[in-house]
Image (tube, coloured by chain):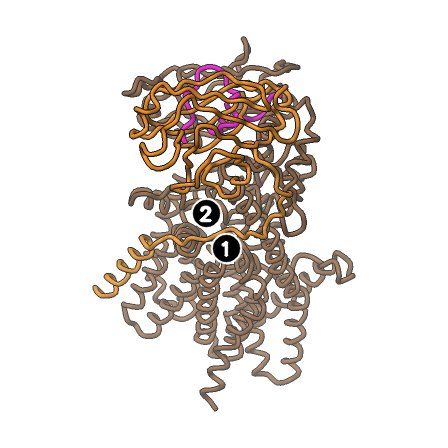
Chain colours: A orange, B brown
Amino acid sequence: MLRIALFLILAAALAITGCERKYRPDPMATIEEPEDLKSSIAMGDPRDASQLLHGFYEAEGSSWRWSMRRFGVSLRPPAGAALQGASLRMTFTIPDAAAEPLTGLEIRASVSGVKLEPFRVSGAGEHHYQAPVPKAALAGEAVTVEFELSRAIEPGVLDGRELGIVVSSIGFAEP
Amino acid sequence: MKHARLALWWLLPQLVLYALNHYAFRAWFQQDDFAWLSQNQNLHSLRDWLVALFEPRAQGTIRPWSERLFFLLNYRHFGLNPVPFHAWVAVTMSANLALLQWLVWRLTASRVAALAAPLAWLANPGLATPLAWLSAYNQILCSFFILAALACLLRALETGRARWWWAQLALFVLGFGALEMNIVYPALALAVVLLRSPREWLKTLPLWAISGLYFVWHHSVAAKPTSGPYARYWDLDMIPTYGRYWGNSLAGGMILPHWRMPAWSWEAAAWTLAALLLAFAVWAWRRGDRIPALGIFWFTAAIGPVLPLRDHFSTYYMTIPAIGLAFILASLSGWAWRHGWPWRAAAALVLCLHLYFALPVQRATTRWHFERGQRIEALVHGMWQAHTLHPGKMILLKGLDDELYWGGFYDAPYRALGIPQVFILPGEEKSLTPHASLGEIAQTVAPENVTARELLWDRAVVYEVDGRRLRNVTRQFTRALPPAWLDARPRLIDAGLAPFQQDLGEGWHQREGNYRWMSRRAEVHLAPPNPATDALFIAGYCPADQAALGVRLTLKSGDTPLGEIRITTANASFETYLPIPDGFAPDRPITVVLEVDRTYQEPGGRELGLAFGRIGWVRR
């Protein structure tokens, strides 16, 4: 009797604590629209790489890329932007090692040639760039967004490349 | 040769089980299954497990083995794969058939009767849903506990060994963890004891005491609705309900469309069968055969607890009572077999009449579950794939019909997959048939302003049901968005979801998980209600410490009081409908103000009133 009880307790413990099964959705379960430009892109997403126009190095750590001093992307303005404009947002990091050479960094951006308010960066860590974009700059199916840094890390300081900031994502959002 | 015949005798019901139910055992998850599958989301400690297993749920049910553990363990190990779930059902049912076969053999001493009993039970339309729909496994498991306990009781009577009696008692007590219907076991046990060893009837008294205690305890924790499908009516309406269950058991309860027979023909068949079987039972009683009477008693005792549920007639309630009908048909078969070919032919005619009406309904029901399950599987995989391709975005669906909506969407299968925001598009509810007994459609419809905002800012995707797949129609739908949607106010908001942020006024804290705390006073902006049909619905939560002290929540719009709720430990997690006051008929959007008389000061400095999910107008 005791053996049966012990067996049942052991079986119950194994059943409850056993590892959870991982499973995946069926890729054929949806029919997707033809690929379109995205209004927000992630640096680590290989599907978004075609929207990087210039000024980026290879993706690192699967979620970020070093930029150069000048870099640009192509984005699709969200449908709502035609009604009320949008907010351009960029999430980026200044690593501790780059904080000193980038002291007093200022980021200037333009959308379809329309210049946005400059953004001043202070210190190392994660930062969220945000600037309002007038709706006049957001016409059409795609716009070019250009960024320029007031300074960059010269080749040979950290490695052999010209380095700007560590970018995670760039996109339009509701203002 | 003798061994081969015996093996075939045991195997035949098992083979028929799998032959008849190959659709049932492949049916996908549906309806309540998804609520049970979602249980896994919040299990982090031993206490969570104990609460998940034993806390009373809807209608006061506590079924740890047949619902909670069954879904928890299988989902934990096998995910959204119904095969292992059905394997449990099939194995339990196999055991049930063997137990019934053995019981009838011991009671009648007839191999023919013992073979007929499980076959007759399998043909019953009441078994179709429990074998196909996993949420009704409770019927199958409860049958197992009852049949196994009776088998032990019979062994105890035959051998006089106490261990069989104790085994019976243990199985009987465990049966309460499968289904409340187990409460009728003492009546069935008494009937068997009176049949085999009448002098030992006193031995059933402890069983009655246990059922009595369970009744008192269950009565104290179970909800007692006075309206709706689960309201109980202890009146003469129970008689037609009793007749309806007999009719459905005997002759299926319907005429399938392709039969081309008059709608009343199944009723005629049911009356004929009832008259013949009753006459047989009376005749058998007179010559000392009590088995048909036991069958009638069994059916009556087992269906008794659900007879007051006048407005919730469900064929799966016939699962356990149908064993009684199987006793009668088995006894008829056994007797006819012993009395030559004319009687055999007569009994075969009765059985054929029963099978002609009942069996196709059983088959059609399992097939319907299977086919509906296939559509639901496609929908759930579509939502899952959409979430994978567009993580973080709201998923909006169009093109769901009644079957898909009520069978595979309303019970929120997406929650089991951790997808937080799935709604049907505004206006889609017009093509759905409301079912008050199943739920409120409004809470699954995305408000117009939220839909417009989320689509315009690429935070939502729209999918349309396209056969067995979901088609992404986001761009096409966004281009045709009605401009007025942007300025609309929602009828119902969910404070715990980010898209409703703009419909909240002052007094709210940041969203946490799927809820949001108010401070002492908070505002919600809503569309005007329809005073003729709407009620104000509020779903929220009050921490136990606060609820113990009592919190009064008042709601008003401008100077008009909309209602007041007293929250205590009895309703700490509350979902309340407040009727709209007479004369309150605004014609433009309004602001509802919620205010509590007691708040809690968090160490961090926040003043917390109550936590809320959904607030807004729903149709009563």
Badge 1: few (under 14), some or many (20 or more) residues near its Cα, within 10 Å?
many
Q: Give the range drawn in magenta.
A: B487-513
Cβ atoms at labels 2 and 1 below 8 Å apart = yes
Q: Name the residue under label 2.
A: B36
Q: Where is residue B314 in the image (x, y as percent from the top left)?
A: 58, 51
- The subunit carrying tag 1 is B
Q: Position of residue B507 (x, y in %)?
A: 44, 16
Q: Where is residue A168 in the image (x, y as percent from the top left)?
A: 43, 33
Quadrant of res B602: top left
Tell me what residue is drawn at x 55 percent, y 15 percent. Answer: B591
- The subunit carrying tag 2 is B
The residue sitting at the top extreme is B559
The amino acid at mark 2 is: Trp
Quadrant of res B326: bottom right
Q: B517 left or right of B563?
A: left
Q: B213 left or right of B139?
A: left
| Image position of A118 with respect to B310: above or below | above
Badge 2: few (under 14), some or many (20 or more) residues near its Cα, within 10 Å?
many
- Which label belongs to residue B134? 1
